[in-house]
Amino acid sequence: MKTLISNDNLSIAQMDESMYYDVWQNSLDEDNRRFVPDEVFETLEDAKEVVDQLISCYDTEEGPFVYAVIRNNDYANIGYVQLIQIEEGWEIGYHIAKKYTGNGYATEAVKLFLNYLRDNTDVKDLYGIALADNKASRRVLEKCGFILFFEGSGQYQGRERKIIRTLIRIK
């Protein structure tokens, strides 16, 4: 596991083959099914295929760049953060598995990832996009300093949905 950045509580690390099972299990929770259904892997083989593809993206400039969020006290893989190219530039994504939510991990992981991006990339502006009814994700973006600039109908997961669009300047 190659760690990009860490603090006392969490680490952000490149995905590797040892994470297949955790990625699969984390993808199956009800929040993932509701908010990011294209990131649900019904079988371990599905998860392996996607993780292998994500690993191959680390050597590109286009991404997507998806990194595991690891809890340091027990090395549990509790979710992910990601950097994805969109028309306007770059978007952040994140998910913490349901059994680990409610502990501030998403906010902590996003803040940690923002520090990494600020110090190690050329990304200046970063978008955060979420379903308008995803109160937890909205709270994470707000706590991390993202500014709401749009709420209304827009494309999300290939469908027209009510979304929010936020932005943060990191450089």
Image: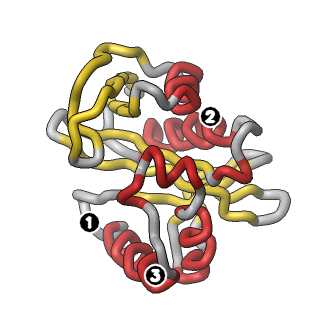
The amino acid beneath tag 1 is Thr
The amino acid beneath tag 2 is Thr
The residue at 45%/21% (across/down) is 146
The residue at 58%/21% (across/down) is 143
Residue at the disc numbered 1: 60
Indicate the position of residue 8 as horizontal and vertical percent values: 79, 46
In the image: residue 165, left or right of residue 110: left
Indicate the position of residue 12 as horizontal and vertical percent values: 59, 55
Q: Would you say the residues marked 3 and 1 are in contact, meaning their CB atoms lie under 8 Å apart?
A: no
Mark before the other along the chain sequence, 1 or 2: 1
Q: Quick one: SS at disc 3? A: helix
Labels 3, 2: front one: 3
Mark before the other along the chain sequence, 3 or 2: 3
Q: Residues within 10 Å of mark 1 (few under 14, many from 20)?
A: few
The amino acid beneath tag 3 is Lys
* Quadrant position of the C terminus in the picture: top left
> 123 or 33: nearer the eye?
33
Residue at the disc numbered 2: 107
The residue at 38%/74% (across/down) is 50
Q: Which mark is residue 112?
A: none
Mark before the other along the chain sequence, 3 or 1: 3
Labels 1, 2: front one: 2
